[in-house]
Image: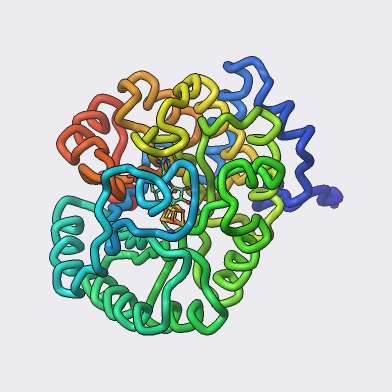
Amino acid sequence: MATRLSDPVSPDIRHDWTRDEAEALLALPFNDLVFRAQTVHRRHFDANEVQLSTLLNVKDGGCPEDCKYCAQSSRYDTGFKAQKLMAVNAVMEKAREAKAAGAQRFCMGAAWRGPKDHELDAVCEMVEGVKSLGLETCATLGMLTDTQAARLKDAGLDYYNHNLDTSEDYYGEVISTRTYKDRLDTLARVRDAGIKVCCGGILGMGEGASDRAAMLTTLANMDPHPESVPVNMLVAIEGTPYSENDRIDPIDFVRVIAAARIMMPASHVRFAAGRMELDAATQALAFLAGANSIFYGEKLLTTPNPGATEDKQLFDRLGLRPMGSHQ
Ligand code: SAM
Ligand code: DTB
Ligand code: SF4
């Protein structure tokens, strides 16, 4: 009998990536990189299926943190007004609309450093309500304690989004009010509570290729990998320190999608913020490079996103279909 040299199910799932390896991937000739990513993609997914998540900001603005990219930080004059936490029934209404439009997951965001316990009571009600509609639930509320993570799990939360945003080395350039370790600690609490992890970053904040490689390496060396990996292109917000940032070369953006696909083969890699800026051909390249998830619906948290009609047309042109819909 032949000796079995590697795991026959997932020989390409690894947690021992080095930054040099990730940097080498990003530097491959584009065709080689995309071919490799598409090959890995097909071993783990139907290459024509895309997961659809709709976002709702349930608490707008007034955030005490100083994330230099964010419309909702109270440190910058972005003209974005702070609001109270939305009422549960108003959130349910938005979730019903998202479900009717074809969303699979409903993701609730709040501009908090972290929730206070009474605020979490209301979010738990939202999670229960949204879950009862038959949608997957996701929340992004900032830092969590162990108890808060456990409560969200009990309420039926499927995913928690908490991004690393960039490399550990570059993190201090972007945010000073919390550390990379704070981020990793919350992610560990989410994982320990049994909630699936949604974790990725932003490109276009002035980081270098080695920062991108380092971020991908940190993500890919998490065991298990984050189930969802959002790759955001910076949406430059007026009034923030990054308002005048040059847009990242879309080819470099696609390279990061491809490297994420290769390094985290079974994760949903999301082409997250930034689709408004890119034409259908560039979006098609991102799907070819292994992106298989998008934010779906006309708004992200505070900025526009392609609407459902536009995305349906794009899917028709590319022969893509929502994940789990059988044809
Ligand atoms: N306050 C919570 C937190 O920061 O964890 C949750 C909401 S926060 C807005 C969620 C994520 O959205 C951020 O970590 C960042 O990755 C992404 N994001 C925010 N503003 C962005 C922008 N202008 N462009 C691209 N991504 C952005
Ligand atoms: C993620 O990675 N991207 C989303 C979500 N997680 C919460 C947010 C994108 C925000 C883009 C800018 C805005 O609309 O304010
Ligand atoms: Fe606050 Fe989150 Fe925006 Fe940072 S990214 S300022 S924590 S809402």
Location of ligand 3 given as a quarter of the image: bottom left
Rendered residue at 28%/50% (across/down): 325
Image position of 281 with respect to 78: above or below: above
Quarter in which the C terminus is drawn:
top left
- On screen, residue 256 versus residue 106, left or right, reads right
The color scheme shown is rainbow
Q: Nearer the viewer, residue 205 or 239?
A: 239
Image position of 81 with respect to 186: above or below: above
Image position of 71 with respect to 74: above or below: above
- Give the x, y percent position of residue 24: 74, 26
Rendered residue at 36%/84% (across/down): 118
Number of labels in the image equals 0
- Give the x, y percent position of residue 211: 67, 35
Rendered residue at 72%/29% (across/down): 23
Image position of 303 with respect to 82: above or below: above
Q: Is residue 46 visible?
A: no
Q: Nearer the viewer, residue 65 or 25?
A: 65
Rendered residue at 65%/55% (across/down): 180
| Quarter of the view holding residue 30 | top right
- Give the x, y percent position of residue 143: 52, 67
- On screen, residue 194 versus residue 49, left or right, reads right
Q: Is residue 291 visible?
A: yes
- Give the x, y percent position of residue 251: 51, 20
